[in-house]
Amino acid sequence: QKEVEQDPGPLSVPEGAIVSLNCTYSNSAFQYFMWYRQYSRKGPELLMYTYSSGNKEDGRFTAQVDKSSKYISLFIRDSQPSDSATYLCAFNAGNNRKLIWGLGTSLAVNP
Amino acid sequence: DTGVSQNPRHKITKRGQNVTFRCDPISEHNRLYWYRQTLGQGPEFLTYFQNEAQLEKSRLLSDRFSAERPKGSFSTLEIQRTEQGDSAMYLCASSPRWERGPSYEQYFGPGTRLTVT
C-alpha cells in the first residue's frame, strides 16, 4: 500500500464551482498535513497546513483533516481560472525533516 | 526578492557529463532540502541539511549524487556521470528555525530543470 494516495485527475470545472480535492494516507505517525499549489514549471507554494483533525479556513480555501479515517481534503469555493494548477498534499511526521507527497491533482477552472 | 533562488533554471547536458546546481535559501533559514520531481509525480525527497550538517539522505541519492552546504548558507547538488534517468526538475526548499515558525513549512525555489541527452 502506498503511503499517500491522491487521484491525479485531471479535474475540469467551470468558474465559480466548488472544488473538492482529497488524499488518503496510511502512516499514523503523520502529524502535519499540508496542501501545496504548483503552477506549471514553478516550485510548489504552501497554501495551507493543519495539525489536528477538523477544519481550517483561509479565504476561499478550507482544509479538512479526519485522522480517524486517514483522509484529508481541500475545498476551493468560487473557483477562479487563476486557481488552475496542480494541488499536492504533503505530510510530515513532526520530525522536522522530509515531507511525504501525493502525486498531485491537476485542476483546470474554465472561464 | 528574498525567496529561495536556484541556478541555473535550465540545464541541458550530454550523458556522462557532470552537472552542479546551486540553491540559495531564504536568509536565516537553517533547514534546507533537496527534492527531485518528474512529470506527473510529487516531489521525491533527496537530502536534508540543518545548518551545514547533512542529516538525512534518501536511498534515491546514489553514489553519483553529492550535496554540500558549506557554512550553512547556500547549497550545491552535484550529479556525476549523468544518465538519461536523471532528467527531472530538481527543487530546493528551506524552512525557518523552529522558534521563528513551524519548521514543517517549506518554501520552495523555482527549480532547476535538467535534461540529459
Image (tube, rainbow, N blue to C red):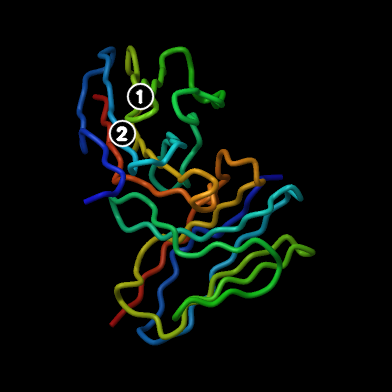
Q: Position of residue B67 (x, y in %)?
A: 40, 21
Residue situated in front as seen by the camera: A58 or A40: A58
- Residue A64 is left or right of residue B29, and the answer is right
Marks 2 and 1: same chain? Answer: yes
Point 60% across, 51% down: residue: A91
Mark 1 residue crowding within 10 angstroms, few (<14) / some (14–19) / many (20+): some
Number of numbered discs present?
2
Q: Position of residue B85 (x, y in %)?
A: 38, 26
Q: Is residue A49 above or below residue B34?
A: below
- Name the secondary structure under disc 1: strand
Q: CB atoms at circles 2 and 1 under 8 Å apart? A: yes
Looking at marks 2 and 1 on the same chain, the residue that comes earlier in the sequence is marked by 2
- Quadrant hosting residue B78: top left
Residue situated in front as seen by the camera: B28 or A48: B28
Q: Report how far apart the C-alphas of labels 2 and 1 lie in the structure.
A: 8 Å
Residue situated in front as seen by the camera: B104 or A87: B104
Q: Residue furthest right?
A: A68
Point 54% across, 57% down: residue: A89
Instruction: Please tell me the numbered disc located at residue B34.
Output: none
Q: Is residue B69 above or below residue B95?
A: above
Q: Position of residue B64 (x, y in %)?
A: 41, 14
Q: Which residue is mark 2?
A: B23
Q: Nearer the viewer, mark 2 or mark 1?
A: 2
Q: Position of residue B13 (x, y in %)?
A: 21, 23
Which chain is home to disc 1?
B
Q: Is residue B39 above or below residue A16?
A: above
Q: Which residue is mark 1?
A: B77
Instruction: Residue type at mark 2: give it.
Output: Cys
- Name the secondary structure under disc 2: strand
